[in-house]
Amino acid sequence: MTVFVKICGLCDAADVAAAVKAGANAVGFVFADSVRRVTPQQARSAALDLPDDVQRVAVMRHPSKEQCRAVLEEFEPDVVQADADDFAGLDIPDNIERWPVIREGAAAMDLPDVFLYEGSNSGRGETVDWASAARFARRGRMILAGGLGPENVVTAIRTTRPWGVDVSSGVESSHGRKDHELIQRFVRAVRAAEKEL
């Protein structure tokens, strides 16, 4: 089984190149309040040379319709990631995938084909309860997020058996600054772990 890898919170073309070189399947750009926040123009420029087989993910949280429209028009993502409740108020074309974020502790709900599972706060390195995550992983293609890094992602994969994993702060040398060696180490760890699945 191949584990889908998303590297999130990228800010420039060098970060994107490092993620692609490491073997990431998707790169995420944050358009919500965060030290990693970028403009749609910055994200578009950073992803200019992205290969067709690597997905561009627009990460938002409680965006207005206007904010979402600007991201869609200027960045042209393959995927929109936002809290599950956000999608009801957004107009997203059918050709763009929707990845809802299911927050830890959420009530039982119908799940889409692909979804993220993470804690109450994104991008802060908060690890979720992996036993709870494992139960969600059995219900669909779950991307595990929150507090992952090169040192614990193997255990996380063994425990939760997710469809994919998502990392941001766990591959940073300082708050908001990606470390390209840590990105390499993270993806190598994932590829080692997936051989056991």
Image: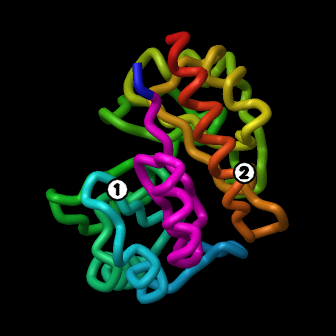
Most distant residue in the top direction = 196
Q: Is residue 123 above or below residue 166?
A: below
For marks 2 and 1 on the same chain, the one whose residue lies earlier in the sequence: 1
Q: Position of residue 20 (x, y in %)?
A: 46, 57
**Magenta stretch in the rendered image:** 3-31
Q: Is residue 138 above or below residue 54?
A: above
Q: Position of residue 125 (x, y in %)?
A: 77, 49
Residue located 76% across and 60% down the image: 172
Give me the disc on residue 144. none
Give me the disc on residue 55. 1
The answer to which of 100 and 164 lies nearer the viewer is: 164
- Relative placement, left or right, of 12 versus 120 is left
| Residue placed under numbered mark 2 in the picture | 182
Q: Classify 10 Å Cα crowding around label 2: few (below 14), some (14-19), many (20 and above).
A: some
Say what secondary structure mark 1 lies in: strand
Most distant residue in the right direction = 174
**Is residue 172 one of those drawn in magenta?**
no
Can you see residue 65?
Answer: no
The answer to which of 105 and 44 lies nearer the viewer is: 44
- Relative placement, left or right, of 56 versus 42 is left
The answer to which of 25 and 116 lies nearer the viewer is: 25
**Is residue 21 one of those drawn in magenta?**
yes
Can you see residue 111?
Answer: yes
Residue located 69% across and 47% down the image: 120
Q: Amino acid at mark 2?
A: Leu
Q: Amino acid at mark 1?
A: Gln
